[in-house]
Amino acid sequence: MAAHRKPKHSPLGGTLGGQAARTAATLALASAATATVFEGAGHATPRPTPAQVRTQVDRLYEEAEVATEKYNGAKERADRARAAFDRLRDEAARRTDRLNRSRETLGAFAAAQYRSGGLDPAIQLALTSDPDQYLERAARAEKAGDRQAAAIAAVRRELTAVRQLRGESEGRLRELKAHEAELRRQKTAVQGKLDAARTLLARLTAEERARYEAAVAAGGHGTGTGGAATARADRTSAVRGPIAAPTARAAEAIAFARAQLGKPYVWGATGPSGYDCSGLTQAAWRAAGVSLPRTTYTQINAGRRVPRSELAPGDLVFFYSGISHVGLYIGGGQMIHAPRPGAPIRVAPIDEMPFAGATRVG
């Protein structure tokens, strides 16, 4: 009998068995949703601490400086390729003008021959009533023929030169476009690193950001303690008097660099309103009459290598294993350098970054 009983109906419609099934399903979904929420919360990315942000920002700025030096090298190569292309293009234009003038001269000879009728010289002599006058004209014609031959040779020379110059220009143009493409890639890399650093810094509170910027302004990379930053600030303000440079040129380079103190770091800049690290050292030694290449990678080979124990004011000091930063040594374990975005050109100890080598120029 029990097997044939009808299921009881719920006042809300449907059977009690169906309602129970729906209730169980609802609870199961709710449980799954709750589990999902807690699981998601368990895997949510925690907010980085201020110390972690500073460490990541310092790393990004170091990577940005590496990319900046690659950008500087690409720009230097692109500038050389453009200058070579412009010289070839100008020379081709001058040669084309000379070719056109030679063609005009040749055309004038052709027109003169046409007007004379192109008669055989023996017939012209037989027909003339004044042989002496004819012989005189023939002598002039022979000279004109020599000039015509010279004009033909000039056309050939200029035509060959123009073709060669145009071929070289096409090669230089391809080279220029390749360097410009590399320049755009490196610029994108620099901007990407700097944008990432700004995004990280934006995650700091106003108080944390102020502490970070104070540490950077004091001479550190934002990772030191307040005491260390204060110590660095004291050390960077110690050099006030004259600096005993070993040569007059070194003294001039240092004087120029000291005059730039407080100006902003600007990546890819060579002055006068802002500099990057290698732009500053290049400009300082240029003021002393010494031409340095543009990048840290090339500046380190621009003079004689010296060990750290023999550093003298005016030497270039390089940092990091990739030789991505440079400063101008001024004695007492200190240098003048353009540190990074947000930090002005300043005096700093050379032991605040991993030392990679030094070069003496001038």
Image (cartoon, grey):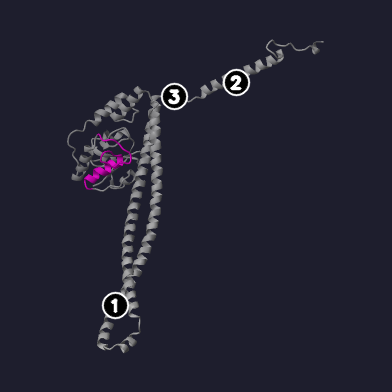
Give the vertical position of 138 relative to 318 (above or below). below
**In the image, residue 107 lies at what x, y percent?**
33, 72
* Residue named by callout 2: 32
The one of 336 and 350 positioned closer to us in this rendering: 336
Q: Is residue 338 magenta?
A: no
Mark 3 lies on a secondary structure that is loop
Residue furthest out toward the left: 242
Mark 2 lies on a secondary structure that is helix
* Residue named by callout 3: 47
Question: Mark 1 or mark 2, which is nearer the start of the sequence?
Answer: 2
**In the image, residue 86 lies at what x, y percent?**
33, 55
Give the vertical position of 313 relative to 114 (above or below). above
Q: Give the mark toward the camera: 3 or 1.
A: 1
Label drawn at residue 144? 1
Q: How many marks?
A: 3
* Mark 2–mark 1 CB contact (< 8 Å): no
Residue 316 visible in the shown view: no
Magenta-colored span: 262-289
Question: Mark 2 or mark 3, which is nearer the start of the sequence?
Answer: 2
